[in-house]
Image (cartoon, rainbow, N blue to C red):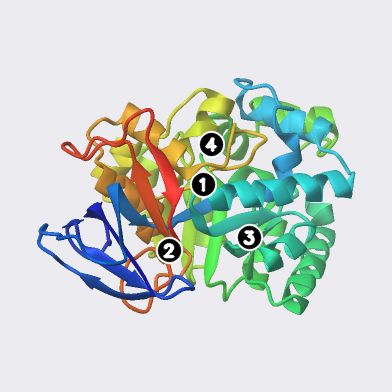
Amino acid sequence: MKRFSAQYIITNSGTPLKRAIITTTEDGTIVGIEDTQGSLYEEHSVEFYNGIIIPGFVNCHCHLELSHMKEAISCGTGLTGFIDQVRNTRVTDNESIIRAAKAADKDMYAAGVNLCADICNTSLTFEIKKESEITYHNFLEVFGIDPAKADRRMAEIIKIAEIADEMNLAYSIVPHSVYSLSLTLFRLLREASSENRITSIHFMETPGEAELVENHSGPLMSSYLKSGLITSGIEAVKSHSDAILNEITRKGNLILVHNTFANQVTIREIGKRKNLYWCLCPNSNRYIENMIPPADLLIDEECIIVAGTDSLASNDKLDMLEELKTLQHHFPSLTIETLVTWATLNGAKALGEEDRFGVIGPGKRPGLLLLQDVDLQNMRLLPGSSVKRLV
């Protein structure tokens, strides 16, 4: 058995406990929590830390496959420029992709992630995930704006799903984004994913999305024409709200990723869909669009917020704490407790894994992290705050 204590424990099962004692088995399963009411006397074998113990992080959006593109993409080019760079820069050397993904997986675990939702366009990272300390849910991503290629796109992703099945990996087949699927492909996917336990989609990441979908114009349309992905007209959903309410399965949880340009009208329209989670990846949004998602608006609209890192193509590191620091910097009223809830419990609920992750409680195995160098008096992160993995 191991025993841990700190100035505060955020269990996600009530208010933070002061100097409580957490007992775990050797494999990290929580045996019990002793509420000392803040009166911790020196006890044998209790490791005491000057900080806050929290559950392991849940990264609700990552692209491990793009780890080899670190520092290869210029920042501040907007989503269209980013997509063009990825299209022109992405390598086909599998060894390089696997080597970079393996290193990123280890770094992410060291930075506190215990559960991760990862976007997959191939099966290249599957072996890494079988051996990883992190538990992964794989979102097998479909995209294709040309309706004539819709059947082929579905056949390709189904082959990847068969590999995931053979390897006993958790997965869902999901759309990439509202702007990157033809209506034909959306409907093929809706049928194939009708029983999804979890679905994810990149959502309202740039103003150009609405221009493309609603008016068939704008920078994304120009990019498609220039690249030859479409030659004239475009077959698309009516709007972002139409895609969410009518073209994606209503079963299970739905994670909307980025939401950088989400507005009140759309938020309220799609709020009719149950089990909706809003994933914020602020450092990626800064990297690509030099914008921050409207966390205050999402809070006002009582949205359930989760957090992610996105990829090393659009971020300096896969570090959840850095995402939380950025959110607190731009929204100073956010407390550590709120941010930790987004990055742990809410993420675990979004991925349907709250029985194991996101909560420090008996029988659970969420991982234990120590938040160090924080403002304990005001319960705020500081620029120098860091994470140490305890379990």
Residue type marked 1: Ala
- Specify whether 318 is left or right of 54: right
- Work out whether mark 4 precedes mark 2 in sequence or the reverse, and give the earlier one: 4
Look at the image and tell me in which quarter the N terminus lies: bottom left
Residue type marked 2: Ala
- Spatial CA distance of label 4 from label 2 is 23 Å
Dot in front, 4 or 2: 2
Say if 187 sits above or below 121 in the image.
below
Checking the image for residue 174, the label placed there is 3
Residue type marked 3: Val
- Assign a secondary structure to mark 2: helix
Dot in front, 1 or 4: 1
Checking the image for residue 111, the label placed there is 1
Name the residue carrying label 4.
205
- Work out whether mark 3 precedes mark 4 in sequence or the reverse, and give the earlier one: 3
Near mark 4 (Cα within 10 A), the count class, few <14, some 14-19 or many ≥20, is: many
Residue drawn 70% across and 47% down? Answer: 103
Look at the image and tell me in which quarter the C terminus lies: bottom left
- Assign a secondary structure to mark 1: loop
Q: Position of residue 119 (x, y in %)?
A: 65, 54
Q: Position of residue 89 (x, y in %)?
A: 81, 31
- Work out whether mark 1 precedes mark 3 in sequence or the reverse, and give the earlier one: 1
Dot in front, 1 or 3: 1
- Specify whether 240 is left or right of 220: left
- Work out whether mark 1 precedes mark 4 in sequence or the reverse, and give the earlier one: 1
- Spatial CA distance of label 3 from label 4 is 17 Å
- Spatial CA distance of label 3 from label 2 is 19 Å
Residue drawn 32% across and 77% down? Answer: 362
- Assign a secondary structure to mark 3: strand
Name the residue carrying label 2.
348
